[in-house]
Image (cartoon, rainbow, N blue to C red):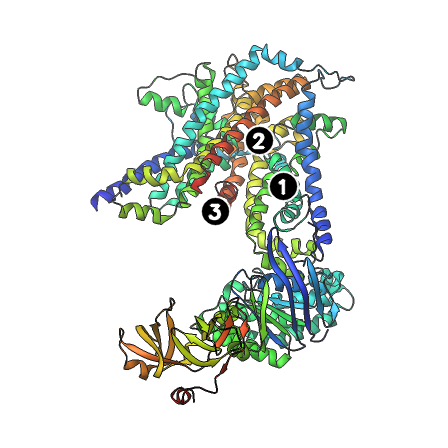
Amino acid sequence: MVDRLLGTLLRHLVLLAGAALMLTPFVIMVSLSLKPPGEIFAPEFRLLPEQWHAVENYREAFTRVPLARFLINGLIVTASIFAAQAATALPIAYALAKLRWRGRQAAFALVLLALLIPPQVPAIPLYIAMWKLDLLNTYAAIILPSTISVFGIFLMRQFFRTVPDDLIAAARMDGLGEFAIVWRIMLPTALPALAAFGCLSFIWNWNEFFWPLIAVQEERLMTPPLGIAFFNNAEAGTNWGPLMAAATVTTAPLALAFLLASRAFVRGVTMTGVK
Amino acid sequence: MAETRPGARAEALAAWALSLPALILLWAMLLGPAVAVLLLSFTGWSLGEAEMEWIGAGNYAQLAADPVFWTSLRNTLIYVGVCVPATVGLGLAAALLVESVGRGRGFYRAAYFLPVASTLLAMALVWEFMFHPTVGFVNQAFGALGLPVTDWLNNPDVALLALAVIGVWQNLGLAMVLFVAGLQGIPRDLYEALAMDGADGPWERFRRVTWPMLGPALVFVVSIIAIRSFQVFDTVAVLTEGGPSKSTEVLLYTMVQEGFTFLRSAYGAAITVVFLVFTLAITMAQTILLDRRAHYG
Amino acid sequence: MAVASVDLIGIGKRFGATEVLQDVTLRAADGEFLAILGASGCGKSTLLRILAGLEGADRGQVRLGGEEVGHLRPKARDLAMVFQSYALYPYMTVRQNITLPLQMRRLSALQRLPLLGRLAPGGRALRAGITADVDAVAGPLQLSALMERRPAQLSGGQRQRVALGRAMVRQPAAFLMDEPLSNLDAKLRVEARAEIVAMQRRLSATILYVTHDQVEAMTMADRVAVMQAGRVLQVAPPQHLYDEPASIDVARFVGSPPMNIIPALLDETGMVELAGHVLPWHAQGRAGARVMAGIRPESLVPRPGGLPATLKRVERLGAEAVLHCALPGVEDTVLARVETAIANGLSPGGTIPLMPRRVLLFQEAGLRMECRPHPAATPAMEGALG
């Protein structure tokens, strides 16, 4: 009994130490964003500043670069991408999971094939195509390559397969056509899965750095990660307070979204994976 | 056999109509460009040139003779070689511990998973500060423990390792969550049967049930972490730019340099193909391994 | 459409190499309750799905009210189905679940649009009519108080009634029910049986009711079709099916405990010889022909002069008891159902005479043979048979 209690205690200690390590960067980020430059480079690290500099740091983050613009861009881009992904993924996922048609196997094979291609592979041809179409440096340039989510199709297909066939048979007998079934039966049934996918999509595309870096040079179009890199370059890594303030502001929506929906989120990650 | 069901034709038509938007985008944004990359890698084209000239394996010959490419490939493999075992090992340990405690699971899961969900680029800058030679957390901790200290990101011997630490920190939570899902898929009664058979110590439980039953999950986690590690780019781009003295030059960074900074599209495409081949090899290895132990169910 | 008859004519269906249905012909008359009874995998559900239009038949015709509907899609057939899983839309309230089929049938696509549909001309009166019809169905099913709940908040029995309501509200030409009670516990099942039968009487509806449960089929249906391995073995009213099974397979399937099937011979006069005893039952047949005698457990009565059986075990069911007996030269255990008072006097190991009151005779291949009590039976036997 005592042994067991001791074991549990030990486990908690190890887990807590690990959690502390995992969270350290976040703590340091927020801590630095509150401090004046002098304290940041003090030889002893303190959690809280002696002299609060938060207002100045955050104000500078928003005025030195158009941080608000970056955040709005981030929202525009992630929202458009998710809307497009959901609109394209739900119908095909239903067709793949529940309809009988020639070409289903081939279509699903294509989806599986596309699942193997890392998102960086199409970058060069897409860049060339957008250059030809004069689309570089537009929202469309950032959004278009992500309008299709193979992962989303796969996730929704897996989910739709768990919807009982009887439900669809009942809908057909009730007089619904295939399109009506997608929007009136499958979509509402799939809302939890769609929410999980939405969280994932939001986080991926908010954090995406590789493609926006290639597609966009203009400050007014930059997404948050791009904006921070831009800020970092402009300040040459010296102005830590405001930089950390910007980093905090960028990460906060994600952390909030994650904490609010961590269950849906984790389910989304694991749903397509191990099972 | 002919489909005799009433409405079968209408159903097939609807299926095509429902699938078409996605299939078109799939080709336009992923499969088509992937094919284009392959074709492009056999030309000598640079962005803006009027003529596209077929040069066969010329780009690949050039790659083979390019020391930067070999450095880049070697660095990438080292990075993956460090990240995968560390991430998988720590992730599995964390998963086992989290599953074995009753309370606080939600908290631990959130804490370990938070880095996966946060903006890597912003966090990379925090790590830059943490690796700061004098006031950084890492050197302060190392100094306090009497361990050697260095300017991590500017020392060619350890810069790649420092980036790998960030990589492990970022992906550990993902590995943990996937392992937890795998653990929860193990039927309780196997442990009970094992206890009835006279083995109920933690080591016996792990060796005889957990580890063998976790096989498929393990293969999956290894491959997913390997693929993600292969895609290392953000930290390199913002922290080291491949330096010092090419010690953190990795495949995707080289590809972006060649393809977009120097606008040598075809050469960049050839690097992309190499990158793709490695990714596919990982997936194939995963498939073969999973097939081989499919009898575990 | 009003209530209509249903005809399945020569239906054949194969899935890959397996022939699921072979030349099935069935008719449910206008207003008839037809049960389709069979073990799982006999093709009964596929038959129902073909009728519904959810599957296609490879051969044969489906007629509804005399009209060929085989080419029509499910929604055009005017049939309603109650599924084993109920297939209620989980995110809709009870009211929405029952309303949906009427919306799809009575409102135009424009009128069905969310929000905008309210503004479409003519929608208001139609909607009012729909609401009235839905309420009219909900009342008798005791769903009125549950209309705003979702399926997850309902008990099994309530869900089953919602599924019934969703089917009834359309006033279809016929109801198709696929094991609708198999997810209910025993007590609810009895209540639901009565409810469905009452509903059928009230609406004089045509019902095709698929089940593997012979009690359901026997208690509810006007006629029962017994299916096995993709074929219809016999279609008859329940009592007739029990009393006069057309084949050994039907005889075995219907009745619990099952009918005793005992190998027998015909002697030179056509009398049935069973376990070394000649019984006063007579059939037309070649002398020495091998036949199968079918005797219901309740037709075996302990009475002097009967077959000498060794009692192996007594299984008490309360009011009655089942005697497990061995007959000399008969491999299978023979069951006899007797009143408990009779069983009380018996002990395992002892010998009891069992007299068959009624014997059915089957050819070795399984088909029923004519078999009558022999007029020249011995007086002792006669008395026993009286």
Chain assignment, label 2: A
Of badges 3 and 1, nearer the viewer stands 1
Q: Image check: C194 left or right of C102?
A: left
Q: Amino acid at mark 1?
A: Phe
Separation (CA) of disc 3 from disc 1 = 28 Å
Asked which quadrant contains residue B172, the reply is top left
- Vertical side of B15 occupied by B255: above or below: above
Q: In the rendered structure, are the residues bearing label 3 and label 1 in contact, judged by CB atoms less than 8 Å apart?
A: no
- Residue A184 appears in which quarter of the rendering? bottom right
Task: Tell me the tag on residue A263.
Answer: 3
Horizontal and vertical percent for residue A63?
Answer: 60, 31
Please provide percent x and percent y for residue B231: 54, 27
Q: Which mark is residue B113?
A: none
From mark 2 to mark 3, how far is it between C-alphas? 25 Å
User: Toward the viewer: B156 or A102?
Assistant: A102
Residue A108's disc number: 1
Q: Which mark is residue A225?
A: 2
